[in-house]
Amino acid sequence: MHLITPESDFESAMLRSQALRDGLIWRIPRRSGAQEHVFEHVQVILGRIEINRRFFSEFEYRVLRFLAIVHDSFKYQVDPDQPKVGENNHAWLAAAFAEQYAYEFTIRKDNILAMIINHDEAYNTRKTFLMNVVAAKVRLGELLSQPIGNWELLLAFSMMNGSHYTRLDNAFWFESVLIEHQLIETRLSQILTL
């Protein structure tokens, strides 16, 4: 049984990793008490990527699948009793894992790793704006200085990763920020099926 159906030899090799498989079967605790396996969340995102495939090049499609598969798969390694920063942050752990597979892509490895590390930052930065505008502006400046390379791809992933209204609302806010800073031209929210 495949937790995720691979579409390439590259994905098959990556999905043979026990560390990744352990992360995919881990249950994500939710405040509501409901839980879902990481692979169930990934499958939803992969479905959204497939529905929107026509808007992406074959390369972008492969990158989006890669991001979907690894982005939350290392939450199980986070120590909940410690601050969720650096080596105790699921995105950082996912990027550390992904580094060994990033050779598959022709864009610079640091662009892919920056996308993984920052995949939740639209959500986190908007939340910060609602609590502390000064801190949020600093956080936004740090985010916009990251070596993302393809902001539309990160935004598309953020939108497809959104599983509820709050996350999508934050992704739409992030889209406006990226347009304001002239990092993207297209309003993805008007073309993607979410």
Image (cartoon, rainbow, N blue to C red):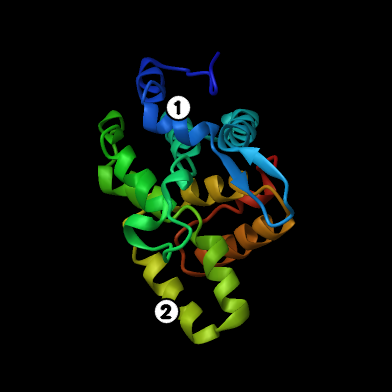
x 26%, y 34%: residue: 100
Which of 55/131 is in front? Answer: 131
Q: Quadrant of the N terminus?
A: top right
x 44%, y 53%: residue: 151
Kindly tell me whether residue 57 is visible in this rendering: no
x, y percent for residue 9? 37, 15
In this view, 119 is above or below 65: below
Kindly tell me whether residue 88 is visible in this rendering: yes
x, y percent for residue 57? 47, 31
Which element is circle 2 on?
helix
Which element is circle 1 on?
helix
Q: Is residue 119 left or right of residue 172?
A: left
Give the label, 2 or 1, closer to the camera: 2
Residue designated by label 1:
58
Q: Is residue 142 left or right of residue 126?
A: left
In the rendered structure, which disc, 2 or 1, sits on the residue that comes first in sequence? 1
Task: State how far apart marks 2 and 1 are (Cα).
Answer: 35 Å
x 58%, y 31%: residue: 46
Which of 184/49 is in front? Answer: 49
Q: Amino acid at mark 2?
A: Val
Residue designated by label 2:
138
